[in-house]
Image: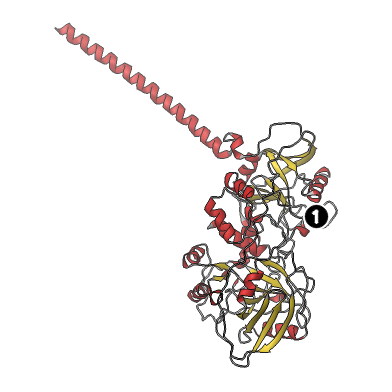
Amino acid sequence: MYKRIIAAFLAVAMSAAFVSCGNNKGGDTGNGGSSSQTENETTQENVEIMNFTPPAEGDTIIEMNIKDYGTVKFRLFPEYADKGVENFIELAKSGYYDGLTFHRVIKDFMIQGGDPSGNGTGGESTWGGKFDGGTDPHLSHVAGALCYANSGSTATNGSQFYVVTGMPMTAEELDSYAQSGYNFSDNVKQAILKAGYGYPFLDGNYTVFGQVIDGLDVIFNVQHVETDGSDMPTTPVIMESVKVTEYHGEECRFFISDYDYEEPTLPPVENVDLVNFSDIKEGDTVACMKIKDYGDVMIRFFPEYADKGVENFVELAKSGYYDGLTFHRIIKDFMIQGGDPNGDGTGGESTWGGEFDGGTDPHAIHAAGAIAYANSGSTATDGSQFYIVTGEKYTDQEIADLEKYGYRLSDNAKEVYKNQGGTPFLDGSYTVFGQVFDGLDIVFRISEVETGDNDKPAEPVTIESVTIGEYDGRKVRWYMSDYDGNTASAESESETSAEAETEAETTENEAETEAAENETEAAETEAAETSAE
């Protein structure tokens, strides 16, 4: 369950214009990232949820035709989101949305569109600029909800919107989320269970202003489109037209169970050879990262699969950029993140100045020990910040759960995540450009330091230097099993073992002494008795 919640938070935080991170970059970007925006620590008011109420005869509705997919109809809620409804209607009447795309699609979460720039960076309201659409507890993020994307508050609503698909939910899962601080009202729970899918973590932070009344199967089909590392469909999903019309009593089909719906069958993931643990050749470029009070971490690079990412790191390191910086964010069983001259996740730039696009490649995955660039929602925002993966080992069931929630893994990747561990839910969204080949025990030891607010270490973990050199043929130790228990916990166990052996020897010596004394006493007694006779 913990991994599933992290994956859910990641989905939220990785939606750049959906939940803006500003300049804050996270390799975890999720259970760290902007999860705090979705936390709902107090019980919601238990008002009636209105998403599934049909419109009245003559009410204004929206008819959206999505090229190659079909038509979707939405009812609107002016009584709960008047400005949001007015904005969408006026933009649609002006033809604003016609020809635009769904530029970001995340399975079991949402499909997002309405940006004339086509990348999540643009769009404005019918009044120009942004507006505040507010929120209302009568409307929840159930499957089919129509909502505005924003950059951190409802006061930054514009033209961008999203339609919720959501995660499949059971009563047991909702209860487990409640135990993690998400105290949904009873009526929200019932609405989510009725829909079967939803994303109630976003309630209260985004303006819900409409609901699908027909064509939910179209929305669910769109969410299965193939996407790149920025969640952008590789084949454009185009809104041919968005029209304002009226409701005339047609049947409302609010739930996916109302449709004869079957999920599209996706082709298997290409089972490429992975390079994370491939041989290093003598003379290959490597980095030595000296971490104060911990030791040296050796890193090999993947220039054939992340050429710009490698070049950026090497040049920054040669210039001394990283010397003296800290690991400003550390999450146990996840990653350690550094490379920000501001020391708080808000700064840093590439060797060329500003940001660059490092891309992704399926040959390099987020295995334990992988090094990758943090970003603000896409690999086009790579800079100087990086993270080193620790992660966890996954069981077959946990991998099956990830796949259920839309994370597609090759057979080779599955074997790595089962046997060596890592963070598979980050694959395809962040630039992996290297791998630790010695000093992985140090990385894991650092991952266990005490942290405070924003996962910042209570005591600074400082990078004394990063030097670039050539591989000299030294022993390669890819896996934690290669370190013979050379971790803090193993050292503690060794000390305990040594103490136990000393104690055992002492006890044994005492026992031998006591036995010898008993034998002496017995001999003296026997001698005394013999003498008496």
Q: Nearer the viewer, residue 370 or 65?
A: 65
Q: Position of residue 279 (x, y in %)?
A: 72, 37
Q: Residue at x 59, y 80 (%)?
A: 136
Q: Quadrant of residue 148?
A: bottom right
Residue 457 visible within the image:
no
Q: Is residue 21 visible?
A: yes
- Residue 102, image x, y percentages: 72, 71
The residue shown at (53%, 80%) is 49
* Kind of residue at disc 1: Glu
The quadrant where residue 30 appears: bottom right
Q: Identify whether 177 is placed above or below 526.
A: below
Which color scheme is applied? Answer: secondary structure
Res. 151 image quadrant? bottom right
In the image, what residue occupies the spot 72% across and 31% down? 474
The quarter of the picture where the C terminus appears is: top left
Callout 1: helix, strand or loop? loop
Q: In this rendered view, identify the residue nearer to me: 519 or 147.
A: 147
**Left or right of 46, for residue 506:** left
Q: Is residue 354 left or right of residue 63?
A: right
Residue toward you, 195 or 455? 195
Expressed as whole percent of the image width and height from the top left, the position of residue 326 reads 71, 48
Label 1 packing within 10 angstroms: few (<14), some (14-19), many (20+): some
Above-or-below relation of 23 to 450: below
Q: Is residue 357 left or right of residue 137?
A: right
Judged from this view, the residue extending furthest toward the bottom is 58
Residue 394 appears at what percent x and percent y?
A: 56, 50
Q: To which residue does mark 1 refer?
A: 349
- State the residue lying farthest toward the left: 533
